[in-house]
Image (cartoon, grey):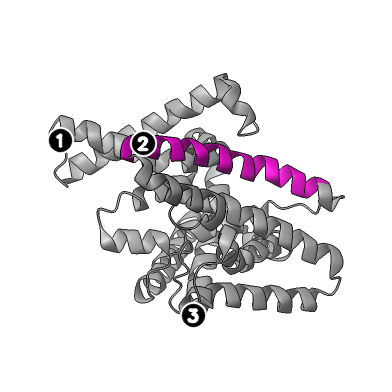
Amino acid sequence: GIGIILMVIGHMHYNVAIEKFIYGFHMPLFFWISGYLYNTPEYYGNYVKRKARTLLLPYFGVGIFYIIIDWLIHGNSVLWNGMLGVFIRTTESLPIESALWFLVALFWVCCLYCLIEKYIESKWKRFFLISCITIIGCKWTNYFHFLPWGINSAMSAMGFFALGRWFRVNGEQKIEGYFNTHKNSFIRRCLVLIVLFVSVGLLIMVNDKVNMRVGNFGIVVLSYFAATSYCMLLLLLVKWLQGVKKINISVLSSIGRNSIIYMCVNHLMLNISKGVLNLGELVSNTAISIVLEFVLAMGLMAIVVNIVKKTFLRYMFSL
C-alpha cells in the first residue's frame, strides 16, 4: 500500500528531489516484497501458469484496452507503435500506462528464480548466478538497447527478489529481535528508525536517479544497498505499526491487496484528475492543487477497484 502511494506521487512529476528519492526504492520494493512472499512451489509448470494468469493476463488485457483508447484519441499514427510497445517492447512505447512493464518483468523474475532454485542446489552457485544476472541486467542499457519483453529489466530486478526471499528466511528474525528487545524502548526504536531512514535517504540522493524500467541505476552497489535497506526498514515499520492497536492500517492493506489494479490505471486516473482540475482552473502547481490531484486520483482508482470487483473484470485480475 505504501509502495503504491509512493508510485502515484512519483508519477505526478511535481518535484525533482521528491521524485528522485521515491524512485530510489519504490519499484525495487515491489520486487523485494514479491521475493519476501515467495513460497517454493511443488510443480514448476503449475507455478508458471499461475503467474501467467495473475500477471500476464492483466498486462495484456489492460494493454490492449489502452491501445484501443490511444488509437481512438490519436488515430492510426499511434496504433503500430502501441502494438509494438505492448506485445514486444513492454518497457517502452506503452500507450497511456508505462507502469505496465512491471507485470511482465515480475513474471520473468518469478519464473527464472523458481527455475534456479529448482535445479541448482548449492546456495553459493545460486548466489553467483543471480549476482551475474543482476549485474548484467543493471548495466545492459548502458551498452545495448532494451531487450524485448522486459527481459533486461527483469534481470536487473533478480537481486531484489532474491534479497527479499533471503530476508524472510534468514534475516528477519534477527533484525526484529533487535528492535523488539526489552532494552529498546518505544522512543529508542523511533530514533533508530528515523536515523536509518534519513541516512539511507541521503545515500539515495547522492546517487544518480534510479529508473528500473529504462535501466538507470547510477552506482549499482549503492542503488541496491539503499533500496534494499529501505525495503527492510519499511517492512519492519509496517509490522511494528500493525502491533500498535491505536493505528488502523486497513486502508493501506486494501490498496496493497489491489495493487495491480492501482498500478494498471494510475497514469490514466492522474491524467483525468489533472484534466478535471484544469477545467476548474485549480491546477497551479501549488501545494493545495497537488494534494487535490493526488486525492482525486486515489479516489478514482478506488472506484475502479470496486467496479472491477463487481464485474467480469475481476477474473482478469484473479479476484
Sequence-wise, the earlier of marks 1 and 2 is 2
Label 1 SS = loop
Q: Does any portion of residue 295 appear in the rendered image?
A: no
Amino acid type assigned to the residue bearing label 2 in the image:
Met
> For this rendering, which residue is in front, 70 or 32?
70
> For this rendering, which residue is in front, 104 or 42?
104
Q: Which residue is drawn at 24% across and 35% down?
A: 275
Q: What residue does disc 2 label?
A: 269
Which region of the structure is painted magenta? 46-74
Label 3 SS = helix
Q: How dense is the environment of label 1, judged by Cα within 10 Å: few (below 14), some, or many (20 and up)?
A: some
Q: How dense is the environment of label 3, judged by Cα within 10 Å: few (below 14), some, or many (20 and up)?
A: few
| 1 drawn magenta | no
Percent from the top left, x then y, of residue 55?
63, 45
Q: Which of marks 1 and 2 is in front?
A: 2
| 68 drawn magenta | yes
> For this rendering, which residue is in front, 145 or 187?
145
Q: What residue does disc 1 label?
A: 282
Residue 77, compared with residue 201, is above or below; it is above
State whether the magenta stretch is mostly helix, strand or loop: helix
Q: Does any portion of residue 286 appear in the rendered image?
A: yes
Estimate the spatial distance between the alpha carbons at disc 2 and disc 3, rounded to whole Å: 35 Å
